[in-house]
Image (cartoon, helix red, strand yellow):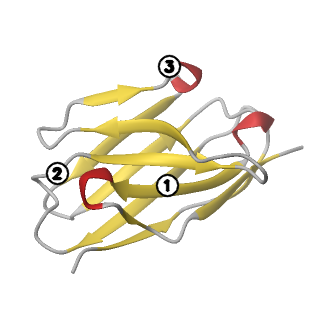
Amino acid sequence: QVQLVESGGGLVQPGGSLTLSCEVSGSIFSVYSMAWYRQTPGKERELVARIAGDGSPSYVDFVKGRFTISKDNAEKTMYLQMDSLKPEDTAVYYCTVPLLDVWGQGTQVTVSS
């Protein structure tokens, strides 16, 4: 059974940086695409970034140039490096394996002075 555990969220000032981690249990890590989503109260979850099984990244427009998605196959961990954070990046961030519809529990990111 695949399980995902996020970590690394917290409070950061505008312009600051955070790195989120998503540890994966199970043997699917290098095979399936994975993604980061985020959600704010009253809104639907939205895609932030995706990484293919071969490591190819893709980003939504509002994070391009600021966020970097990556993964370490040996550590079975996916990362989201977030730079130049803005207050509107405040949300609960989730990692997921879309094809399996498996989600982590989420980690809160708050950008505020």
Residue 1, quarter of picture: bottom left
Q: Are marks 2 and 3 in contact (CB under 8 Å)?
A: no
- Mark 3, secondary structure of its residue: loop
Residue at the disc numbered 3 = 65
Instruction: Determine whether 18 is above or below 69 in the image.
Output: below
Q: CA distance from mark 2 to mark 3?
A: 24 Å
Residue 36 in the image: state x and y as whole percent.
44, 47
- Mark 2, secondary structure of its residue: loop
Left or right of 8 on screen, residue 85: right
Q: Could you tell me which residue is drawn at 59 percent across and 64 percent down?
A: 107
Residue 8 in the image: state x and y as whole percent.
54, 62
Residue at the disc numbered 1 = 20
Quadrant location of the C terminus?
top right
Instruction: Determine whether 34 is above or below 88 in the image.
Output: below
Q: Mark 3 belongs to which amino acid?
A: Gly
Residue at the disc numbered 2 = 32
N-term mark: 1 or 2: 1
N-term mark: 3 or 1: 1
Q: Could you tell me which residue is drawn at 25 percent across and 53 percent down?
A: 99
Residue 51 in the image: state x and y as whole percent.
28, 39
N-term mark: 2 or 3: 2
Instruction: Determine whether 12 is above or below 86 in the image.
Output: below
Nearer the camera: disc 1 or disc 2: 2
